[in-house]
Each structure stands twice: as C-alpha cells, then as structure tokens.
Amino acid sequence: MTDISVDKANVPEVRLVVTGHDADKRGVIVRDTRVGPTPGLAADSWEARELWSVKSLPSLPDDGLAAIEPHASGPGSVRLIQCVIHPEGAPLPPGDPDVTSRTVLRTDDTAMHFTASVDLVVVLDGEVEVVLDGARTVLRQGDFLVQNGTRHEWHNYGDRPARLGVVFLATEHRGY
C-alpha cells in the first residue's frame, strides 16, 4: 500500500491580482499578493483558499478594494476560491467547525453536502469525482462544472492533490 501524504510543495500559494480605478478612472493594479489556505476551511479531504469575496457586486468604476468583504456570504454575495481536494486517505489539519458550518451545509453523516449557491467550477489540475444523489462523474484538468445547489461530495482517487477554481454565486436555497 502506498503512503499518501499531503505534500505542501505540491499545493503552492495562489497569486491574486486585483484591478481597480484611480482618481482619473484609469485601470490600475490595486493588489498583487500570494494567498495561502484559509484557516478553518479544511473539511474531509479538501481545503480552500478564499481569494476574493464581496457582499454584492460593486458599481463601476471603483477603487477595486472598497467592496471586498472577507468571507462574504448570503444571497447576492460572490466568492472566488481555490479548492484543493487531497487524495483519499491523506492527512489534513482539522478544520474549524464554525467556519466549515457557514460554508458547507451537511445533510447527514457522510461527506454529502450542499451550498446555497450556484458554483462555477473549473478543474485547474488533477482529477476529481463529483458524486450527486443520482449521478457521478469524473472531472479532469480543463473540465468545467456548473453546480446548481445539488447535494454532492468530492473524491480524489489519484495520488496527488487536485486544484479547482470556484466562483460561488450565493443565492436562496430551500434546503433538503
């Protein structure tokens, strides 16, 4: 049996560049930074890097920074996140249950969950399986998924982390 462990060198920090407008309404770079994992968002076999979020979309032109609200949630909010789904059996640091419960809505004792959002997902690297109540499919690098608030769970049966880029468009959800 192969020992699978999380190699943080294979899960690098993410570069985030944010644009905005100066006083003359010219486009400028307002932030250029590296983002590591968001503390507390580890759950099951995934972790997240919350890159950018707003409570609601700003009116443009703007300075590019004023509307940013870390961990924004609720209908109308938008979040840009990179999820890393680790291979099955890889050890992870424990997540903060308070943060995880605001992000993921569990419906039973399995990894099945839903989010009150439409999620636009692209597989940046690796391969994952998404499991729904009545279907499952493997997504590979370059594949896109529109997740419409369905109950789902993620699996990585490979030997290296899979990276997903996700835009969460928060909305109302009547739940299960």
Image (cartoon, grey):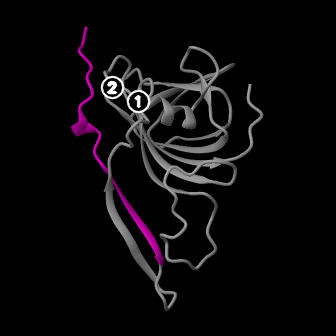
> What residue is shown with label 2?
92
Q: Do the residues bearing badges 2 and 1 touch, measured as CB atoms within 8 Å?
A: yes
Residue 155 placement, left or right of 33: right
> What residue is shown with label 1?
95
- Give the camera-side residue of 49 and 126: 49
Quarter occupied by the N terminus: top left
Query: Rounded to the nearest whole Å, what is the CA distance between mark 2 and mark 1?
Result: 8 Å
Residue 134 horizontal/vertical position (percent): 69, 19
User: Count of labels shown?
Assistant: 2
Q: Nearer the viewer, mark 2 or mark 1?
A: 1
Residue 81 placement, left or right of 151: left
Q: Amino acid at mark 2?
A: Leu
- Give the camera-side residue of 47 and 161: 47
Name the residue located 45 percent from the left edge and 72 percent from the top edge: 19
Residue 16 horizontal/vertical position (percent): 38, 59
Quarter occupied by the C terminus: top right
Give above or below for 109 relative to 87: above
Q: In terms of image quadrants, where is residue 96?
A: top left
Q: Which residues are magenta?
A: 1-20
Residue 100 placement, left or right of 12: right
Give above or below for 172 relative to 59: above
Residue 9 placement, left or right of 107: left
58 part of magenta stretch: no
Residue 123 horizontal/vertical position (percent): 47, 41
Residue 66 horizontal/vertical position (percent): 51, 70
18 part of magenta stretch: yes
- Give the camera-side residue of 138 and 165: 165
Q: Amino acid at mark 1?
A: Gly
Name the residue located 51 percent from the left edge and 62 percent from the top edge: 68
**For the residue carrying disc 1, how many other residues have a C-alpha within 10 Å: few (<14), some (14-19), or many (20+)?**
some
Q: In the displayed image of the protein, which residue is found farthest to the top?
A: 1
Q: In terms of image quadrants, where is residue 104?
A: top right
